[in-house]
């Protein structure tokens, strides 16, 4: 399909392990966002890419979280030394252009469970 | 502190009636506001955007208002249908192309 895809759809890991979550944005979209959503809450901003560079990473909760987008398309969110509190749905969104007025297209999310 | 408030209680509405959801915010000065709809297990889907200088925006059966004095947006679903059953989220522009989302308000349309 032509939408945003995320893999895996579900990830179960043990406390202390490292995980990578992948996002394939809509082709041609220059802006890419990562959010985290806990049950009963709205999406919480983590990081925003414009092209290959992180334009705003102020939402990353601590230095265990890191994201890359080396070729300006696919992005990977990396979480080191996972904690139970990291359990949530991680959403990726992309949009065209650089202006915030553009609507964001969301993927289905990756549900991360840290045991 | 900054807050975005949406009613945490689900709104039950009879099919065909109008549902109205409220989004109140504190300590934000958004240049625009967006509404998204989210079904369980899926990502949010964009519905409408309204700028700070616009009072009202319509799209099919949806209408959004934006009052920067009251710091409030109202989201109306007219002639509601069972397919409108979902969680509707308001999202405020908070600078640097970032969106701050509310918790969302669940709507249940009863046939």
Image: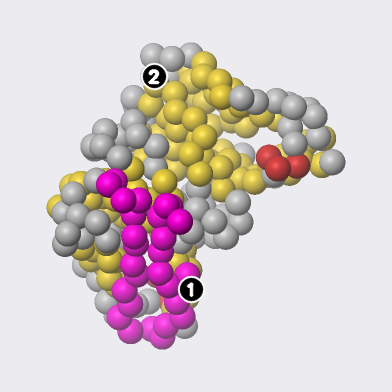
- Same chain for mark 2 and mark 1? The answer is no
Tell me the residue that label 2 is attached to.
B52
The x, y position of residue B77, in whole percent, is 66, 29
Q: Residue at x 51, y 44 (%)?
A: B45
| Image quadrant where residue A73 sits | bottom left
Q: Residues within 10 Å of mark 2 (few under 14, many from 20)?
A: some
- Magenta extent: A1-29
**Which quarter of the figure has residue A13?**
bottom left
Q: Is residue A66 above or below residue A4?
A: below
Q: Please say whether residue A89 is visible from this viewpoint.
A: yes
Relative placement, left or right, of A89 versus B1 is right
Which residue corresponds to mark 1? A10
- Given contact means CB atoms under 8 Å apart, are the residues at marks 2 and 1 in contact? no
Distance from the alpha carbon under mark 2 to that under mark 1: 39 Å
* Residue B103: % across, % down: 52, 46
Q: Is residue A28 left or right of residue A5?
A: left
As drawn, which residue projects farthest toward the front? A1
Crowd tier of the residue under label 1, counting other residues whose Cα lies within 10 Å: few below 14, some 14–19, many 20 or above: few
Write the residue at 41% across / 46% down: A105
Which residue is painted at 45% across and 77% down in the image?
Answer: A11
Which secondary structure, mark 1?
A: strand
In the depicted view, which residue is nearer to us: A58 or B53? B53
Who is closer to the viewer here, B82 or B4? Answer: B82
Examine the rendered structure and indicate whether residue A4 appears above or below residue A79.
Answer: above
* Helix, strand or loop for disc 2: loop
Q: Front-most of A107 and B38?
A: A107
């Amino acid at each position: 399909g032509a939408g945003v895809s995320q893999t895996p759809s579900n990830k179960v890991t043990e406390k202390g392990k490292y995980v990578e979550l992948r996002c394939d944005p809509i082709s041609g979209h220059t802006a890419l966002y990562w959010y985290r959503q806990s049950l009963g809450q709205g999406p919480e901003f983590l990081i925003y890419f414009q092209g290959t560079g992180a334009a705003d990473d102020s939402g990353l909760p601590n230095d265990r979280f890191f994201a890359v987008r080396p070729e300006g398309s696919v992005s990977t969110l990396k979480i080191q030394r996972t904690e139970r509190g990291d359990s949530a749905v991680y959403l990726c969104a992309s949009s065209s252009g650089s202006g915030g007025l553009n609507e964001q297209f969301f993927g289905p999310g990756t549900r991360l469970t840290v045991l | 502190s900054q807050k975005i408030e949406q009613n945490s209680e689900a709104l039950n509405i009879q099919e065909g009636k109008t549902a109205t959801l409220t989004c109140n915010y504190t300590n934000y000065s958004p240049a625009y506001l967006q509404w998204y709809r989210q079904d369980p297990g899926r990502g949010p889907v964009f519905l409408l955007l309204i700028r700070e200088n616009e009072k009202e925006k319509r799209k099919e059966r949806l209408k959004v208002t934006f009052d920067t004095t009251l710091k409030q947006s109202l989201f109306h679903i007219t002639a509601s249908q069972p397919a409108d059953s979902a969680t509707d989220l308001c999202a405020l522009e908070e600078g640097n192309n970032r969106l701050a989302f509310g918790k969302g308000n669940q709507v249940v349309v009863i046939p």
